[in-house]
Image: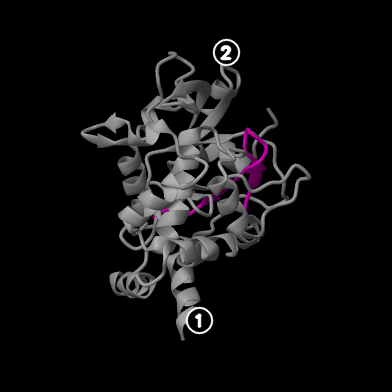
Amino acid sequence: MTALPDSIIQNGLFCCWKYEERNERKTKVPYQPQTGLGAKSNDPSSFVPYKTAVQASGYDGIGIGIFNGICAIDLDNCVSDSGYYTQTAAEIVALMHSYTEYSPSGNGLHILFSAKGFQYDTKRFYIMNHQAGIEVYVAGATNKYVTVTGNSCEDYEYGDRTQELQVLLDKFMRRPEVGAENAINAKNSDLSMEQLLQLAKSSKNGAAFTALWNGLLEGYLSPSEADLALCSHLAFWTGRDAAKMDTMFRQSGLMRDKWDRQQSGTTYGAITIQNAGRSTLQKRSRHRFFNLLFH
């Protein structure tokens, strides 16, 4: 592993991680290298200095805890095979202008920065934007760690980005106001499912939606992850109308027997729809779009 910047090494606490299969997907499980026990991402005492983690053997990589004012942004599936960033990723990287590296897969980016004492208002801002592939790690708001590779892709230096973080949250992570969401639903309720489908396919994210609609799994670690992604799109366009989401999903190329499988007193499909509804983002953009469409 290429060395991280000294400022991150000196201020950070680290763990090791291994790839393991959990809930039908390959996930990165954190470990304490000195004991082999699982590391707890909300417990700094289960993390170690950089040197201890990087010298450990038998693991697939190392990660850094979100402690001591260290923050991170995780951008998924945003780097093409040719090395180009998506438009959203390029905008965020330029905005944050802090240490940026490739994720272990090589098709994502991690941005590390400092925002000590930042108060993350989870009632106003999402932690994860599934649709845009953005997750923000801030101490006190998330109990996760982030993998680090040392494979930097920009010359930006690690530093305090408190103001930039707020700009990012305002633009990409803001939760919709209840009044605005109700207005969207009212305007949206008259559209047929065929009209909603055409709007989704012709939107800015139309290519991603269409691929999922046709049952293509490229870029997703498991069919379940693709299910959630498609449902997030459907939630976005239906105003989180669970009945419409269910009907439309059943018409998609992802539909399979598992959708109706009994799980936790309900069905796998119902749980997926509920989870997608909770995490649906970018409604402000859709609100503006519908204002243009109907006025």
Q: Residue at x 32, y 74 (%)?
A: 186
Label 1 residue SS:
helix
Viewer-nearest of labels 1 and 2? Answer: 1
Q: Is residue 164 visible?
A: no
Does the magenta run of residues contain 48?
Answer: no
Q: Residue at x 62, y 33 (%)?
A: 104
Q: Mark 2 points at which residue?
A: 58
The answer to whether residue 152 is above or below residue 183 is above
What segment is highlighted magenta in the picture?
Answer: 98-117
Q: Residue at x 59, y 14 (%)?
A: 57
Badge 1 crowding class, 10 Å Cα cut-off, few under 14, some 14 to 19, many 20 or more, is few
Place of residue 32 in the rendered image (x, y in percent of width and height, measured from the top left): 45, 20
* Amino acid at circle 1: Leu
CA separation, marks 1 and 2? 56 Å
In the orientation shown, which residue stands out farthest toward the right?
Answer: 82
The answer to whether residue 145 is above or below residue 16 is below
Q: Which of 180 and 84 is in front in this view?
A: 180
Q: In which quarter of the image is the N terminus?
A: top right
Rendering quarter of residue 179: bottom left
Q: Name the residue under label 1.
A: 292
Q: Which of 43 and 283 is in front in this view?
A: 283
Looking at the image, is mark 1 or mark 2 earlier in the sequence?
A: 2
* Amino acid at circle 2: Gly
Q: Which of 26 and 263 is in front in this view?
A: 263
Label 2 residue SS:
loop
Q: Residue at x 50, y 79 (%)?
A: 293
The answer to whether residue 158 is above or below residue 285 is above
Place of residue 273 in the rendered image (x, y in percent of width and height, measured from the top left): 35, 47
Place of residue 221 in the rendered image (x, y in percent of width and height, measured from the top left): 54, 33
The answer to whether residue 207 is above or below residue 259 is below
Place of residue 143 in the rendered image (x, y in percent of width and height, measured from the top left): 37, 39
